[in-house]
Image: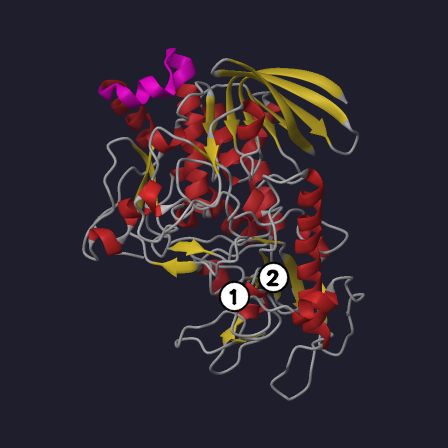
Amino acid sequence: MNREYACDIAVIGGGIGGCAAALAAAEAGMRIVLTEETDWIGGQFTSQAVPADEHRWIEQFGCTRKYREFRNRVRGYYKANYPLTAEALRSDRFNPGAAIVSRLSCDPRVALAVLQDMLAPHIHAGRITLLLNVRPSGAVTDGDTVRSVTLEHTPSGGFVAVGARYVLDATECGDLLPLTGTEYVTGAESSRDTGEPHALAGEPEPLDIQSVTWCFALDYREGEDHTIERPAAYAFWRSYQAPFQRDRMFSWTPLMTSEAVKRFSLFPEPGAFSLWNYRRIVDRSQFAPGAFDSDITIVNWPQNDYWLGNIYEVPEEERQRHLEGARQLSLSLLYWLQTEAPRPDGGAGYPGLRLRGDVTGTADGLAKAPYIRESRRIRAEFTVKEQHISPEVRGVGGRAEPFRDSVGIGSYRIDLHPTTGGREGFYIPSLPFQIPLGSLIPVRMDNLLPACKNIGVTHLTNGCYRLHPVEWNIGEAAGALAAYCLQRGVSPRQVRCDPSRLADFQDALVRRGVELAWPDLGPV
């Protein structure tokens, strides 16, 4: 497979941001090549199997019109194709899994079907060319301009080259940044450099990156035995306890220090936090009797966060070792749950737990790709820092820093999972925030834009700019910006610096249904 493609805009990465960027650019009449490393578009929603993490106002406001269309289509898909109860059919806020963490916890296959349907008219019309199973391996640049990107077709070992007038990096780890020589940052910054209250007090640590998680789907069949083969690394993980953990990794109390939640449990249990309901994607009580013989849940828990090493900014051999380490951790957690996890009745293990590889589209039962929380980040014209969004800095009754160049909004706590530098992470409030255009513009490169988690944020603010609706908004804004610049013969920098052009672009975003400012709200 050795081919060349030419297009207006190359969107490298088919996750949430990539799909949103491709849709925005195609709707503006551009020709797009959209690429994806796996065989499923959708990223967090699909190949990573992470139900939507959203803010509490999501049903009323706080996302783009296109993201809301996606959510409505997901609900419509269930109502058109699944036997639901009468109450579920009537609900305009139907949540398939009734999950604790998400107002729309759906099967990854449903999210995939909906995204494919949204892209289909553009693919069939030839505006979008979708390339699956391709991973960026090189780039050709000319000064401050990216001319083309080379991608390896992983099943065949062949290569494709994509030439484009604009290149959008929507990869999960910001893979185009080193390939194109774009200036970028990784890991944890120093408070000396950023002025952030919770940044490192000493030197920055570029390899101190949030943990990844290899998610998987489970159902439960009482009385059956679906115990997997003992994983090779089980002995290690069974006894592992990080210095910041109050108990071993495999326990019901590995990280919980809050007095509000004493411990975890697998199934709902008085006084405990139900991990089963936490990221559940099928609540069978909402479906007609017999439609499902079990709930289905996604395991993305504190017990399978992997922080023993990085999967980027390291040699390929080390990357592969840590990818396998993350897989082994998740399989070991499942084996512990099936064989040794303490039960309320005094027994041990739940052998009826069954991997659902059909849900994740894999033979081994795990998701197609690990859940990536933190990417490489461009050195941007403007970087969002903790003091721009923190109620600790701005006052509990205050508002986040207003950005005149807003291209969208988002809201979530600053949520840092344990890091590869051995830090516990933390979970602190933030104020509903805006996405400044300056955070999408690299300090030097002219035709490369970030369209995922790789915008101008810090290690800390990445913790709230990385969630599903924010990533969609970033991608949609990047796709719309590239199309706007091509249609008018201007650069992203010119759009930001010229008040009349900026206002015109923002008007175009508003017409698309992109919200640029929040109403008066308190901290999250």
Relative to 143, say whether 368 is above or below: below
Instruction: Say few, some or many: other residues with alpha carbon within 10 Å of mark 1 (under 14 / 14 to 19 / 20 or more).
Output: many
For label 2, the residue is: 304
Relative to 283, say whether 351 is above or below: below
Q: Please state which of residues 284 and 33 is positioned toward the viewer in this rendering.
A: 33
In this view, the mark in front (1 or 2): 2
Q: Please state which of residues 450 and 210 is positioned toward the viewer in this rendering.
A: 210
Report if residue 358 lies within the magenta region.
no
Residue 362 horizontal side relative to residue 205, left or right? right
- Magenta part, dominant SS: helix
Residue 199 horizontal side relative to residue 44, left or right? left
> In the image, what residue type sits under mark 2?
Asn
Where is residue 309 shown, x and y percent of the image? 61, 51
In the image, the segment drawn in magenta is 485-499
Where is residue 520 shown, x and y percent of the image? 21, 50
Image quarter (top left, top right, bottom left or bottom right) of the N terminus: top right
* Residue located 25% across and 18% down the image: 498
For label 1, the residue is: 278
Where is residue 189 shown, x and y percent of the image? 41, 44
Can residue 521 be seen in this snapshot? no
Image quarter (top left, top right, bottom left or bottom right) of the C terminus: bottom left
Q: Earlier in the sequence, mark 1 or mark 2?
A: 1
Colour scheme of the rendered structure: secondary structure
